[in-house]
């Protein structure tokens, strides 16, 4: 469904993505793991074209979307995705209910009278209720994350990019979100790309796993294979060890 | 020295580029998508209501000081306070009403716009607009440009009236000019051309403030500190541009006989 070839992206002379290559299969869950600051968020922002890559190629259903500039074509492309922001990115001038209903007006033909029902239903999916009239500023971090997820789910996307959907959630809530992601795949055939730091969740929900390291896709493998890999970078990451080829730059 | 001038010109050109890109994006979406009517209404009332008291107060005192200055000058030259209404009215309607109101609104509403949009930018809310089927031009900028272009000329009108009232109070109580004479001086010498002159200017200022403040907000980077910097820059740039544009607009309008 999506082919990423030799993708490059720098910020101010610092090359973050050097040459990333992998593909995302329709109807599957692809998990992206990698150290903090390796460019995972940058990568999925390139896919939905919130960022323009510096080089390489992204093919979406065979169509090259790497350098689309036309605003209408970009808007059309972004319609195909749901995107969960790492920090939630809720509109703080609107209530929770208005936030969750926001995309319905622009991306669906749902009559406005049905919004409250959909909002309630999607909030329930992420374990929240009776908070429609609250403001994002009044919510806890984990609640914001879930409201943001409800906002994505409201528009029923066929492809969802999740930037750390379970970070900041308690283990039980994390499990519920993991089941939700798997459920969407099973019941509706939704394709997902999930960034996560939680290896347990990753093995549980992934079909394919991608490990980013030093601007490249160091290892791309089916979840089962990934678990038993002897790639030293991936091993270190899976085991969460401070000893290994990946060196964090820490100075005293 | 040359390096600094060069850098200044580069920054200026870059920002001009950003602004024109934003404006053309607005034109693009204005033609292709329905107007965000609710947002426009909210913004218009916010700009208007926010600034009406301070705009009226500013020009009340401006009218008062104009009357006082005109009165003293006229007394010195003609030994009588003549044409106070005309002088106060002219200065307000053609010049000070539009400029001072634009200043006041830049400080109140313009700064708020940059801070709000800048915060949205650094917390990825602008990106979120794109992912939810709309875009900042359509959802944020167009409503604000329209709101400013409605609210500022209307506020200017209020400011003019309040300034002339201030002038009237000072001339009646401080200079001994009767209100009838004062009002007559205004009515006889100030025509629709003068009103038009002020109106065109204030509409133009409104457009400029909205564009500068939205553009600065959308190009904010670097967290809370960045928002602060963007807001200060937006206010300063708007005020300088108002004064520069005021001169050129006056020259152009005068050459057209308005
Ligand atoms: N807009 C930007 N401007 C400049 N640098 C940026 C920008 N966005 C990201 N970066 C830099 O790119 C690098 C990768 O950022 P990114 O957010 O993609 O990391 P990440 O893998 O998602 O990390 P985390 O797991 O902590 O979320 C970081 O070093 C960051 O400083
Ligand atoms: Mg990230």
Image: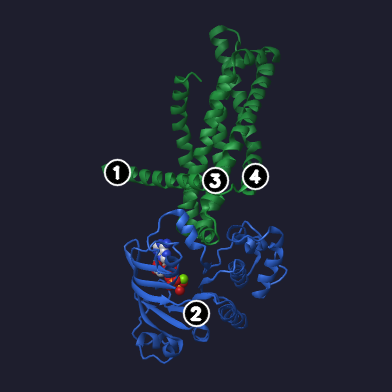
Chain colours: A blue, B green
Q: Are marks 4 and 2 in contact (CB under 8 Å)?
A: no
Q: Answer yes or no: is residue B129 visible.
A: yes
User: Closest to the observer: B219 or A103?
Assistant: A103
In the picture, the disc for residue B41 is 4
Chain letter for the residue marked with disc 3 in the picture = B
Residue identified by numbered label 3: B142
Hey, which residue is sitting farthest front in the picture?
Answer: A62
Chain letter for the residue marked with disc 1 in the picture = B
Q: Position of residue B45 (x, y in %)?
A: 66, 42
Label 1, residues with CA under 10 Å away: few <14, some 14-19, many ≥20: few
Cα separation, mark 4 vs mark 3, equals: 12 Å
Label 3, residues with CA under 10 Å away: few <14, some 14-19, many ≥20: many
Ligand 1 under 8 Å from disc 4 Cβ? no
Q: Residue at x 36, y 85 (%)?
A: A233
Q: Are marks 2 and 1 in contact (CB under 8 Å)?
A: no
SS for dot 3: helix
Q: Quadrant of residue B94?
A: top right
Q: Position of residue B12 (x, y in %)?
A: 37, 43
Circle 4 or circle 1, nearest the eye? 4
Q: Is residue A72 above or below residue A40?
A: above
Chain letter for the residue marked with disc 2 in the picture = A
In the picture, the disc for residue A29 is 2
In the picture, the disc for residue B37 is none
User: Closest to the observer: B160 or B249?
Assistant: B249
User: Going from the N terminus, do you reach mark 4 or mark 1 first?
Assistant: 1
Circle 1 or circle 3, nearest the eye? 3
Q: Position of residue B247 (x, y in %)?
A: 45, 27
Q: Residue at x 50, y 52 (%)?
A: B228
Cα separation, mark 1 vs mark 3, equals: 33 Å
Q: Is residue A64 above or below residue A169?
A: above
User: Going from the N terminus, do you reach mark 4 or mark 3 first?
Assistant: 4
Residue identified by numbered label 1: B6
């Amino acid at each position: 469904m999506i082919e990423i070839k030799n993708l490059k992206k720098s910020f101010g002379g610092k090359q973050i993505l050097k040459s990333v290559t992998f593909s995302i299969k329709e109807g599957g869950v692809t998990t992206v793991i990698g150290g903090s600051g390796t460019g995972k968020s940058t990568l999925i922002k390139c896919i939905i074209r919130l960022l323009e890559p510096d080089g390489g190629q992204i093919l979406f259903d065979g169509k090259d979307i790497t350098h689309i500039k036309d605003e209408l074509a970009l808007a059309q492309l972004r319609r195909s995705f749901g995107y969960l922001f790492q920090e939630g990115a809720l509109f703080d001038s609107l209530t929770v209910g208005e936030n969750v209903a926001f995309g319905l007006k622009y991306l669906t033909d749902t009559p406005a009278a049905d919004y409250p029902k959909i909002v309630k239903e999607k909030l329930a999916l992420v374990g929240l209720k009776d908070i429609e009239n609250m403001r994002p500023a009044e919510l806890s971090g984990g609640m914001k994350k879930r409201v943001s997820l409800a906002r994505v789910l409201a528009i029923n996307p066929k492809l969802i990019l999740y930037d750390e959907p379970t970070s900041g959630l308690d283990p039980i809530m994390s499990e519920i979100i993991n089941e939700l992601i798997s459920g969407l795949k099973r019941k509706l055939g939704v394709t997902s790309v999930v960034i996560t730091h939680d290896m347990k969740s990753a093995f549980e929900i992934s079909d394919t796993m991608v490990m980013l390291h030093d601007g490249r896709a160091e290892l791309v493998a089916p979840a089962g294979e990934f678990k038993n890999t002897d790639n030293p970078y991936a091993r270190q990451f899976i085991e969460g060890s401070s000893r290994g080829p990946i060196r964090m730059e820490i100075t005293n | 020295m040359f390096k600094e001038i060069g850098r200044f010109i580069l920054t200026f050109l870059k920002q001009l580029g950003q602004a024109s890109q934003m404006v053309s994006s607005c034109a693009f979406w204005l033609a292709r998508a329905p107007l965000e009517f609710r947002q426009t209404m909210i913004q218009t009332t916010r700009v208007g209501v926010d600034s009406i008291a301070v705009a009226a107060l500013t020009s009340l005192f401006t009218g008062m000081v104009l009357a006082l200055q005109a009165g003293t000058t006229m007394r010195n030259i003609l030994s009588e306070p003549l044409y106070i209404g005309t002088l106060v009215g002219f200065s307000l309607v053609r010049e000070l009403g539009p400029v001072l109101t634009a200043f006041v609104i830049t400080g109140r509403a313009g700064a708020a716009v940059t801070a709000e949009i800048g915060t949205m930018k650094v917390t990825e809310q602008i990106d979120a607009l794109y992912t939810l089927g709309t875009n900042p031009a359509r959802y944020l900028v167009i409503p604000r440009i329209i709101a400013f272009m409605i609210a500022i000329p209307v506020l200017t009108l209020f400011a003019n009236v309040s300034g002339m009232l201030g002038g009237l109070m000072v001339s009646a109580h401080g200079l001994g000019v009767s209100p009838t004479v004062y009002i007559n001086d205004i009515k006889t010498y100030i025509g629709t051309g003068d009103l038009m002159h002020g109106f065109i200017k204030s509409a133009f200022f409104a457009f400029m403030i909205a564009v500068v403040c939205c553009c600065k907000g959308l190009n904010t980077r670097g967290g809370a500190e960045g928002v602060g910097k963007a807001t200060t820059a937006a206010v300063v740039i708007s005020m300088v541009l108002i004064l520069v544009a005021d001169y050129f607009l006056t020259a152009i309008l005068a050459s057209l006989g308005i």
